[in-house]
Image (cartoon, rainbow, N blue to C red):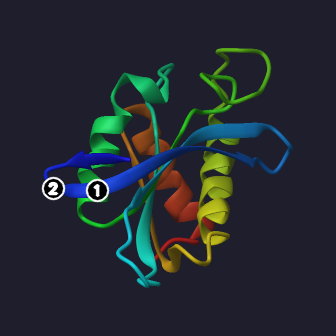
Amino acid sequence: YFEVMNISFTRRNVEFSADDGVILRGWLYEPVRETNNEQLYPAIVMTHGYGAVKELYLDLYAEFFVQSKFVVLVYDHRNFGESSGEPRQEINPIKQIQDYSSAITYLQSLTNLVDSQRIGIWGTSYSLQHSKITLIIKKKIT
């Protein structure tokens, strides 16, 4: 449980599988719901730039978005940080783009929390390009 600018939220560790079985790990930020509130929230998928890990700065951005009542999924790219994958620290842009799609699918599975028609993706630096390509290829995001 955290509170930033009077907005309460939780952050929990999560993991989900990529299409090829690699385990992607990250944090799920959720606005704290008021009693009996069954509202579905819009969501944002975030991942880090070239060679980085989620701990470097993504938490600050996630906290900003959760203040506006977004659910935010922040995760490490495959082969980096807490996510699995070999060889470690190897950048694989094609797989990383496919992993964005797996992250979207994970959020869509949270049917009691996320509005599956309102999922966006957000990237910094290197992952910004991934997010653009994912939008073009998958068209899973509205």
Kind of residue at disc 2: Asn
Tell me which amino acid carries mark 1: Ser
Q: Residue furthest left?
A: 5
- Number of numbered discs: 2
Viewer-side residue, 85 vs 128:
85
In depth, the one of 74 and 127 nearer the eye is 74
Q: Which mark is residue 8?
A: 1
Residue at the top extreme, as displayed: 88
Residue 45 placed where, x, y %?
48, 54
Q: Determine which quarter of the picture holds residue 88.
A: top right
Question: Is residue 132 positioned above or below 111 on the image?
Answer: above
* Rendered location of residue 89, percent (x, y): 64, 15
The residue furthest right is 21
- Please report the residue visible at 80 percent of the width from the left and 20 percent of the height from the top: 86
Q: Is residue 124 left or right of residue 85?
A: left
Gap in Å between the C-alphas at discs 1 and 2?
6 Å
Q: Which mark is residue 105?
A: none
Q: Which residue is mark 2?
A: 6
| Left or right, residue 56 beside residue 89 | left
Q: How many C-alpha atoms fall within 10 Å of the one at disc 1: few (<14), some, or many (≥20)?
A: some
Please tell me whether residue 39 is drawn above or below residue 69 in the rendered image.
Answer: below
Which quadrant would residue 108 be assigned to in this image?
bottom right
**Helix, strand or loop for disc 2:** loop
Q: Position of residue 55 (x, y in %)?
A: 43, 25
Secondary structure under tag 1 reads strand
Q: For the point 64% across and 57% down, which residue is it?
A: 101
- Identified at 37% across, 35% down, the residue is 58
In the rendered view, does 5 fall on the left or right side of 37? left
Marks 1,2: beta carbons within 8 A: yes
Of residues 116 and 131, the one nearer the viewer is: 116
Residue at 33%, 28% in the rendered image: 57
